């Protein structure tokens, strides 16, 4: 499977299953999408503000829910394989994406996998193990959180520097070299702890006075 990023802002995500997995999926999407969770029972977990509907849908009711909400993504997270099959079929009829929480093997065309994610805007780090080892995904996510602290600030800093170098007429090859030097310099990373202005000053020391170099 090829990793892609998808914008769900303004879309609906429909989840069947209110257990721990359904709750985790709801939290994942609730920041952007309108999330509806349909289940006869709900785990004592946080659902991220998702709309929870207490119902016991059969295959026909699943199709009705999909037609009613017109979701961009349907998540099948029940412990009933037949009901998950019905959710997948209904989603395909509406050309919606499908995430099968119970499918850890070969994925069908149109199915998506939701990876373990670390977000430090504008940077997103994600890892997936093909459903083989959720424990490893969690372990790697936690390592990413610890090891890549400050990546969002670094992305903003280097993005600003790229624009400044471009405006100063620095050739593309030199711009790339300069930005790579900043990203690879430990002193810049440490300076981010003191704020972006301090880090910008250190970054300028790393790449030199751009105005003077380009004149």
Image: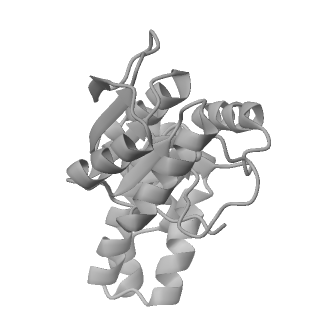
**How is the structure coloured here?**
one colour
Residue 14 can be seen, yes or no: no
Quadrant in the picture for residue 33: top left
In this orientation, which residue lies closer to the viewer: 190 or 73? 73
Q: Split into 4 quadrants, where in the image is the C terminus?
A: bottom left
Say which quarter of the image contains residue 40: top left
Q: In which quarter of the image is the N terminus?
A: bottom right
> Considering only vertical position in the picture, is 203 above or below 142?
below
Viewer-proximal residue among 142 and 14: 14
Q: In this view, does 81 lie to the left or right of 10?
A: right
Residue at 58% over, 49% down: 126
Figure label count: 0
Q: Is residue 106 above or below residue 171?
A: above
User: Relative to residue 140, is residue 128 depicted above or below?
Assistant: below
- In the picture provided, is 180 more to the left or to the right than 6? right
Residue 29, given in percent of the width and then of the height, sits at: 37, 41
**Residue 75 percent location from the top left of the image:** 46, 44
Q: Residue at x 53, y 22 (%)?
A: 20
**Residue 115 or residue 18, whichever sits in front:** 18
Question: Is residue 182 in sight in this rendering?
Answer: yes
The residue depicted at 43 percent of the width and 90 percent of the height is 171
x 59%, y 33%: residue: 80
Residue 37 spot, x, y in % from top left: 35, 32
């Amino acid at each position: 499977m090829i990793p892609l990023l998808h914008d769900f802002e303004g879309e609906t995500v429909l989840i069947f299953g209110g257990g721990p997995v359904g709750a985790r999926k709801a939290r994942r999407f609730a920041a952007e999408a309108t999330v509806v969770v349909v289940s006869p029972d709900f785990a004592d977990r946080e659902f991220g503000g998702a709309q929870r509907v207490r119902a016991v849908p059969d295959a026909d009711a699943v199709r009705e829910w999909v037609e009613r909400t017109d979701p961009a993504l349907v998540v099948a997270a029940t412990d009933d394989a037949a009901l998950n099959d019905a959710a997948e079929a209904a989603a395909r009829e509406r050309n919606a994406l499908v995430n099968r929480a119970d499918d850890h093997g070969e994925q069908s065309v149109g199915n998506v996998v939701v990876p373990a994610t670390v977000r430090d805007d504008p940077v997103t780090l994600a890892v997936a193990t093909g459903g083989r080892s959720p424990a490893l995904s969690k372990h790697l996510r936690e390592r990413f959180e610890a090891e890549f602290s400050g990546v969002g600030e670094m992305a903003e800093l280097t993005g600003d520097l790229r624009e400044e170098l471009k405006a100063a007429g620095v050739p593309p090859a030199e711009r790339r070299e300069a930005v790579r030097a900043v990203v690879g310099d430990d002193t810049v990373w440490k300076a981010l702890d003191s704020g972006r202005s301090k880090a910008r000053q250190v970054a300028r020391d790393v790449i030199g006075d751009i105005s003077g170099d380009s004149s």
